[in-house]
Amino acid sequence: MKLLLTNDDGIDAPGIQTLASVLRREHEVWIVAPLRNKSGASSSLNMLQNLYLERRSDKDFALDGTPVDCVLSAFTGGYLPSRPDAVISGINRGYNLGTDAVYSGTCGAARQASLTGIPGIALSVDKNPFSASGSAADSEYNYAALAEFALKNLKNLLVLCGKIRNIDEGMNYEYFINVNAPSVDSYKGVKFTKPCRRFYCGDHTVLTKEADGKTYSCFVGGENVRCYGDEFSDAKAVADGNVSISVLYAEPAVNTEFCEKTFC
């Protein structure tokens, strides 16, 4: 298959480079990834702006934009010989569990792929839970195990995106796939899950006044994360040592019961 890889950690991140190395054993792999870290970019994109595109190799490109910018550029820019068979976003440095998917650029890229008629998969791992270090060095993230899982199970993951749909001449897939796994060498199993609720304790904003006399606001995410969900949640699955697979709607989902009601 012809695969397009992207991420939100940036093209030089070890997660995407490990994934590319593993998938290239059996597939034709192209990379169009952000030039620099774009974590938290969600589904944002730049319109009517010239974004620097750097060719790193025959099949690897860095774009100074968001993950969604990368997907759209690859699909419509004409520098790929043809559209890919699938888009894989990641492997992300840190989980994208539950409500993280709302903010995640990793998930945003996979969602955009499915909305554009190509199945999208997001892959994420967290720091080794058994590490004694309080830091978050890349050496504490096991990207290889999830890359091997993706290679072995790629066809089955793509089937989960559903069937291609033609709506008013626009092609899309109903779902994109969000995969999370702990940083371990082998997994206990694979669980289909539903998103948990993630709460970052200690989120805060720092205001600083710089030498130019202007005031700047910087949001700092809390590091202590609480997860709320039942036994079928993605957080529970990875905490137990499993791979979590969530089949998420690419389009916004609504409560259709209200369509039959009259607003008063």
Image: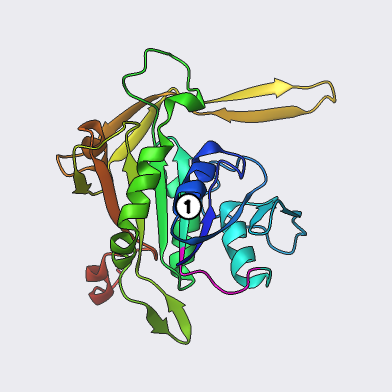
Of 226 and 114, the residue lying toward us: 114
Q: Where does the image place residue 45, in percent across and percent down from the top left?
A: 61, 57
Residue at the front extreme, as displayed: 25
Residue 113 as seen in the image, left or right of residue 258: right
**Residue 81 is a magenta residue:** yes
Above or below for 196 versus 153: above
Range of residues picked out in magenta: 80-86
Give the secondary structure at mark 1.
Answer: strand
Residue beneath label 1, please? Answer: 89
Decide if residue 230 is on the left or right side of residue 149: left
Residue in the picture at 24% in, 73% down: 261
Residue 104 in view: no
Extreme residue in the right direction: 212
Query: Looking at the rendering, which quadrant does residue 159 occupy?
Result: bottom left
User: Could you tell me what secondary structure mostly forms the magenta stretch?
Assistant: loop
Residue at the spot 43% in from the left edge and 14% down from the top edge: 134
In the image, residue 125 above or below residue 134: below
